[in-house]
Amino acid sequence: MGLLRYLVALVVFSTLALPGGAQQSSPPPKLQSSQASASQGQPQQPQTSEEVLKQEENQRALGVVPLFNMTSVRNAPPLTPREKFQLMLKTQLDPFTFVSAGLTAAIGQETGSFLPYGEGAAGYAKRYAAALADNTSSNFFGNFVYPVIFREDPRYFRLGEGRIRHRVLYSFAQAVVTRTDSGGRTFNFSNVLGGLTAGTISNLYYPASDRGIGLTASRAAIALGYGSAGNLFLEFWPDIDRKLFHKQRPQAAAGP
């Protein structure tokens, strides 16, 4: 979803030794309101897809990085096509998306990528436009068009408990396996085809030396790798957040 988000994911590897050992569990505080009510003896009210989505759209890491595509509600209702579009659009219009494109362009200029774009302000502007276009096409097709066509849920369903190794493998698997709108599991056509489509479209504006079938496939593979890192970040960030900032788990959601 952006360069900075995946760089922050590196924090995961330095904080996996969570208090309580490998069985550390981390039910999220905001998205467990119905479970908390049930544990207090109140009738459990199922949340609608709109209610869950509104809560998810307030999720951020460090108060900056949007985590809109993550849900910790195990049986979250499927999103309607309108809600998938809403989620895609909110992600795309978030200020972090534009900041991320700027960082990508700056790193590209510093490392000499896309040399035909040139140097200076003009070169940076071209790299910035390319980075933003990459993000837009990947987000549009991967989080809206293909999820609607294949009836797949574009969100990352966080496991949130169990052994660390299992959670790591689970997060990596979500790059190629996803949940369907009917609650089943299927090959993640949205993610894979979204990356390939974005890579193909980039041939329209990348320099001639950076076009072609091989480079398109390579960019799609790299995008899948970034996606896996992003999933790892989504899986463990709530744990890291609690450990680093000493946020206490609500008593009702703490579990046995």
Image: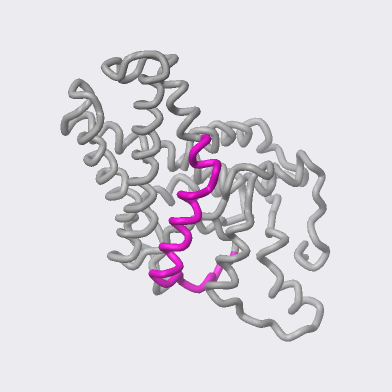
89 and 143: which one is in front? Answer: 89
Q: Which residues are magenta?
A: 73-99
Task: Answer left or right for 203 relative to 224.
Answer: left
Q: On the picture, is 54 further left or further right than 242?
A: left
Q: Is residue 185 toward the left or the right of residue 232 in the image? A: left
Q: Which residue is rendered at x = 27% and y = 31% of the image?
A: 218
**Which of the two residues, 36 or 255, is positioned nearer the viewer here?**
36
Q: Which of the 4 image quadrants contains residue 133?
A: top left
At a point 68% along the width and 50% down the height, the residue shown is: 23
Query: Residue 83: within the magenta?
Result: yes
Judge whether 250 appears above or below 169 on screen: below
**By what rule are the colours in the image chosen?**
one colour
Up the image or down, 13 lies above or below 63; here it is: above
Q: Quadrant of the C terminus?
A: bottom right
Residue at the front extreme, as displayed: 122
Residue 189 pos. (x, y %): 30, 55
Number of residue marks: 0
Placement of 23 over or under 104, stated as above or below: below
Residue 235 drawn at (x, y percent): 58, 48
Determine the main secondary structure of the stretch shown in magenta: helix
Asked whether 210 falls inside the magenta stretch, the response is no
- 47 or 243: nearer the viewer: 47
Residue at 64% in and 44% down: 61
Which of the 4 quarters of the picture holds residue 27? bottom right
